[in-house]
Each structure stands twice: as structure tokens, then as C-alpha cells.
Image (cartoon, rainbow, N blue to C red):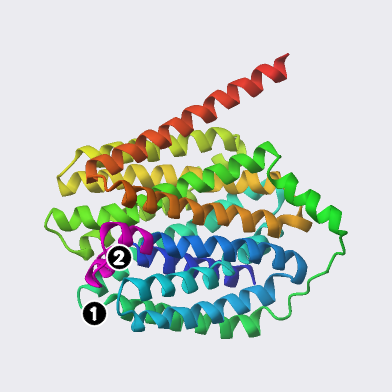
């Protein structure tokens, strides 16, 4: 059962990452301006935020099975709508529906996995789930980048939709035996727990890490395909570049080095991961050679592989099973908000490739510095 849920996680992120090399060029092909292109990239994540939060509440109330089932069927249907995109406005509407429907899937899936992870191995458990995200980051961009040179973005999205339908049918048969023990909570208790999510230091750090991780992803989704095209290469090259960071990440997730996530405090690996991502962005702002772009994406992959398990471990350590659905709902809402903020801000500022990557790198390094200073402050308070 866990293996099948990992498969759902893989294809949910596969759909996300397969959009990265093709959505900016597709929006431009429909006549979108720079701002509208950024909005089209970010619209998916904006509505995904709403879906994530709703999914979290419904998962705690109804259990993960029905939420996963509805999310998979609805996502499959929404992916087929890209065939009907005839201009920037219609694309924005389709992106909204797609993002909302897919937002129902991931919080329910990760709640299922987190509730079944042994406490002593929770770091390695989230590293394994991260490996499936990493595999999606490898195959998604490469698949769409290569196929887009022969077909079109709507075709790629339709294939993803068919996969979602197949997963939905399989989930109906494989997961329906899962029993969920419904817990009754008073209205005041529910409100307390929602407030608690935003007051617990570990939870706040997990939310912040999720936001800035996907802020950088939003910038990559918007700027990297356009920079690659400006350098004279096609979407296939963009796909290979984006897959590079996935290859590096999955190696770290699955090799024995993943034991570090059980032995080292999540705040330390968080600070290291976000620092590496910031350095990779600064590097991307300065280079023009294609080979160096691969080096930059390797650095980004190292950062991603340390940051993703760290923020998941912080969330698990800071929440209990009975309201972990809400925690993951807000957690992945911050993922989605981060993409919106990254793509929309850079699109609005209309920065050059150099300026966009440099600004993102500075922001990420500032967050890493703030994290380190926060750790030192906590150590001082503890010693006193």
C-alpha cells in the first residue's frame, strides 16, 4: 500500500515538473506578455494553494482514501482541458482548475506516509518520499522537453491526464481497504490547532522552508526555459538541465548518506540546503556556457536534497497524527504560494535573466543566514 502511495506522489510531482520546460513557451505561443506568462506559470500554484488547504481539512475529517480518489479523477479531467486553450485568458482559467484539483492529492498522500513512518526513521522515510520527488524531477522535465520538440504542450498534458485516470482506477481497488478511524473534535479545539500550526517554531520553519524552496522553483520555471532559448537551445536542453538537479537529489536521497537526516538536526541541514540553492542561483546569474549550467543545476540538486527532507522532518516532529492532514495542507499551500511569488514577482519586475537569478540567490542566502542566527539564539537561550 505504501509503495502505491509513493507512486501517486511520483506522478503528482511528475505532472508538476513536466510543466516546467513547456509552460512559458506555450504561454508565449498563445500571445501572452511577460507578465501574463508569469501569471500563467503561477496560476497553477495559486489555485493549488487553495486545494492544498481544503485537502488538509478533508483528510483529517474523511481520511486520505476518498480525497486521493477525487483528486486523481479531477486532475485527470483538468489536464485534458489544455487542448482547448486558445489564448492567454483561457490558459489562465485552465491553469486555475488544474492547480486546484491537483492540490487535493499531495497533502493526503504525505499524511498517509507520515502517519506510518517509525519515529526513529522518520528522516530516512521522508528521504525516500523525496527520492520519488527527485525521480519526478528527473523524468518529468526530460520527458516534456523531448516530447515537446515533436508534439505540443497540450499533448503532453493530455498524456499526464490519462496517467491520472489510471492511478485513480488503481487507487479505487488498492486503497479502498484502508480504514480510517474518525476522531471527533470540538469546534474550539479545531480552531486552536489551526492557530497552533502558525505558532509552533518548528512548524513555522517548515512552512518557510517550503515557501522558499518553491519560490526558487517558480523562478526556474519562468526564467530558465527563456534563458536557454535565448542561448540558442530548445526545450529538450531545458528538460535535461532541470533533470540534472533531480539526478543529484535522488542519489543523495537513496545512498547511505541519507542517514544524515536521522542524525543531524533538521535546522542544520535546512540551512545548508537553502545556502546551496542560493549559491546555484547566483552562479546561474553569471554564466553563459551550457556546461556551466549543468554544474549550477548540480549545486541546486544538492541544496534541494538537503532542504526537502529537513522541512518534512520538522513538520512531522512538530505535529501529531490527528491533525497532520491540516499541517500538510498548509505546508503544501506554502509550496504553491512560493511558486506564485517567485514566478509572479520576477514576471512583474521584468528583470533580465541575470537580475532574476541574482535576486533569487540573495533572498535564499538571506534566509539561510536568518536560520543560522536563529539556531545560535536558541542555543544561547538553552545555555542560560
Tell me if residue 124 comes above or below residue 84 in the rendering. Answer: above
* Magenta-highlighted residues: 22-40
- Residue 99 rendering spot, x and y as whole percentages: 49, 68
Q: Which residue is mark 2?
A: 142
Mark 2 to mark 1 CA distance (whole Å): 14 Å
Q: Is residue 261 left or right of residue 187?
A: left
Image quadrant assignment for residue 93: bottom left
**Does the magenta-highlighted stretch encompass residue 151?**
no
Tell me if residue 317 comes above or below residue 17 in the rendering. Answer: above
Q: Residues within 10 Å of mark 2 (few under 14, many from 20)?
A: many
**Disc ID at residue 194:** none
Q: Residue at x 63, y 68 (%)?
A: 2
**Disc ID at residue 151:** 1
Identify the element where label 1 is drawn.
Answer: loop
Callout in the foreground (2, 1): 1
Q: Residue at x 26, y 38 (%)?
A: 283
Q: Residue at x 20, y 73 (%)?
A: 149
Amino acid at each position: 500500500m505504501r509503495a502505491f502511495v509513493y507512486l501517486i506522489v511520483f506522478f503528482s510531482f511528475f505532472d508538476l515538473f513536466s510543466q516546467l520546460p513547456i509552460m512559458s513557451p506555450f504561454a508565449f505561443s498563445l500571445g501572452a506578455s511577460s507578465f501574463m506568462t508569469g501569471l500563467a506559470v503561477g496560476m497553477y500554484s495559486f489555485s493549488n494553494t487553495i486545494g492544498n488547504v481544503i485537502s488538509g481539512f478533508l483528510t483529517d475529517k474523511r481520511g486520505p482514501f476518498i480525497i486521493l480518489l477525487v483528486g486523481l479523477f479531477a486532475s485527470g479531467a483538468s489536464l485534458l482541458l489544455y487542448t482547448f486553450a486558445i489564448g492567454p485568458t483561457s490558459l489562465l482559467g485552465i491553469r486555475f482548475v488544474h492547480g486546484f484539483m491537483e492540490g487535493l492529492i499531495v497533502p493526503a498522500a504525505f499524511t498517509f506516509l507520515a502517519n506510518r513512518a517509525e519515529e526513529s526513521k522518520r528522516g530516512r522515510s521522508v528521504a525516500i518520499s523525496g527520492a520519488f520527488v527527485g525521480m519526478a524531477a528527473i523524468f518529468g522535465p526530460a520527458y516534456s522537453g523531448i516530447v515537446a520538440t515533436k508534439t505540443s504542450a497540450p499533448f503532453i498534458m493530455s498524456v499526464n491526464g490519462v496517467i491520472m485516470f489510471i492511478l485513480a482506477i488503481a487507487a479505487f481497488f488498492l486503497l479502498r481497504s484502508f480504514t480510517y478511524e474518525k476522531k471527533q473534535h470540538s469546534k474550539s479545539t479545531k480552531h486552536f490547532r489551526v492557530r497552533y500550526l502558525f505558532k509552533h517554531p518548528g512548524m513555522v520553519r517548515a512552512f518557510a522552508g517550503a515557501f522558499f524552496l518553491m519560490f526558487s522553483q517558480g523562478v526556474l520555471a519562468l526564467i530558465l526555459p527563456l534563458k536557454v532559448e535565448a542561448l540558442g537551445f530548445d526545450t529538450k536542453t531545458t528538460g535535461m538541465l532541470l533533470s540534472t538537479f533531480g539526478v543529484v537529489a535522488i542519489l543523495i536521497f537513496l545512498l547511505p548518506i541519507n542517514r544524515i537526516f536521522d542524525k543531524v538536526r533538521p535546522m542544520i541541514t535546512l540551512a545548508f540546503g537553502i545556502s546551496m540553492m542560493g549559491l546555484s542561483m547566483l552562479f546561474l546569474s553569471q554564466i553563459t556556457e551550457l556546461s556551466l549550467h549543468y554544474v549550477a543545476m548540480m549545486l541546486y540538486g544538492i541544496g534541494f536534497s538537503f532542504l526537502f527532507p529537513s522541512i518534512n522532518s520538522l513538520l512531522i516532529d512538530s505535529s501529531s497524527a490527528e491533525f497532520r492532514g491540516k499541517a500538510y495542507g498548509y505546508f503544501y499551500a506554502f509550496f504553491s504560494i512560493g511558486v506564485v511569488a517567485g514566478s509572479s514577482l520576477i514576471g512583474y519586475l521584468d528583470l533580465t535573466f541575470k537580475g532574476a537569478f541574482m535576486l533569487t540567490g540573495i533572498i535564499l542566502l538571506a534566509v539561510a543566514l536568518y536560520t543560522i542566527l536563529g539556531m545560535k539564539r536558541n542555543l544561547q537561550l538553552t545555555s542560560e
